[in-house]
């Protein structure tokens, strides 16, 4: 299945030429993932952080295809490519006007503090079940 989230390009996203400054894309990928967890998985980042847990990004690669400009609306698409014991590989694609602008591969790891130290944790069963159901659901 594919999760969609529109994001309008604002002045704060842009460099002086009026195109998205590349680090802002990475902020957008985090926003898309955070909203995916809230809307689809039913778990907010705030709730995870209150438990001293979360989903930090451990790897990130991007392919910049075309510039995005102030005022445009990007249609972000998120798919789960793989779901492991404690990790998840995402593909995020930002498009506008039918043209892909950016492709990002991102690995998140479910982690928390154990004994005061950060550690990878197994996905809690309810979260894993919802992630797997989303990953394997047919596109409608």
Image: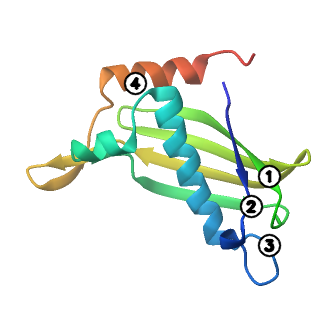
To which residue does mark 2 refer? 9
Which residue carries the number 3 mark? 19
Q: Is residue 54 above or below residue 62?
A: above
Characterize the local packing of mark 2: few (<14), some (14-19) or many (20 or more) Cα atoms within 10 angstroms. Answer: many
- Pointers 2 and 3 in contact (C-beta within 8 Å): no
What residue is drawn where x is 18% and y is 49%? Answer: 113
Instruction: Determine whether, in the image, residue 99 is placed left or right of residue 123.
Output: right
Nearer the observer, 75 or 87: 75
Residue 63, horizontal then vertical, whole percent: 73, 60
Nearer mark to the viewer, of 4 and 1? 1
What residue do we see at 49% from left, 44% from top?
34
Q: Secondary structure at mark 2?
A: loop
The residues bearing labels 4 and 1 have C-alpha atoms spaced at a distance of: 31 Å
Q: Residue furthest bottom?
A: 16
- Contact (Cβ within 8 Å) of mark 4 with mark 2: no
Q: Image point 91% across, 44% down: which residue?
A: 98
Q: Marks 2 and 3, how far apart in space?
A: 9 Å
Category of crowding for the residue at label 4, using alpha-carbon neighbours closer than 10 angstroms: few (below 14), some (14–19), many (at least 20): some
Q: Which mark is residue 73?
A: 1
Q: CA distance from mark 3 to mark 4?
A: 37 Å
Q: Nearer the viewer, residue 92 or 73?
A: 73
Mark 3 closeness class: few <14, some 14–19, many ≥20 residues within 10 Å: some
Residue on which the image places disc 4:
128
| Helix, strand or loop for disc 1 | strand
**What percent of the width, then of the height, locates residue 120?**
28, 45
């Amino acid at each position: 299945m594919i999760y969609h989230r529109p994001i309008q390009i604002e002045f704060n996203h842009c460099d002086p030429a009026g195109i998205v400054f590349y680090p802002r894309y990475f902020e957008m990928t985090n926003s898309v993932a955070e909203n995916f967890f809230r809307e689809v998985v039913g778990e907010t980042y705030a709730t995870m952080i209150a438990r001293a847990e979360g989903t930090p990004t451990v790897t990130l690669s991007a392919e910049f295809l075309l510039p995005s400009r102030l005022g445009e609306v990007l249609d972000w698409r998120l798919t789960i490519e793989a779901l492991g014991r404690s990790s998840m590989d995402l593909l995020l694609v930002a498009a506008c006007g039918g043209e892909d602008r950016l492709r990002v591969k991102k690995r998140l790891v479910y982690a928390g503090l154990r004994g005061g130290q950060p550690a990878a944790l197994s996905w809690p069963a309810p979260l894993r079940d919802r992630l797997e159901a989303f990953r394997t659901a047919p596109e409608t």
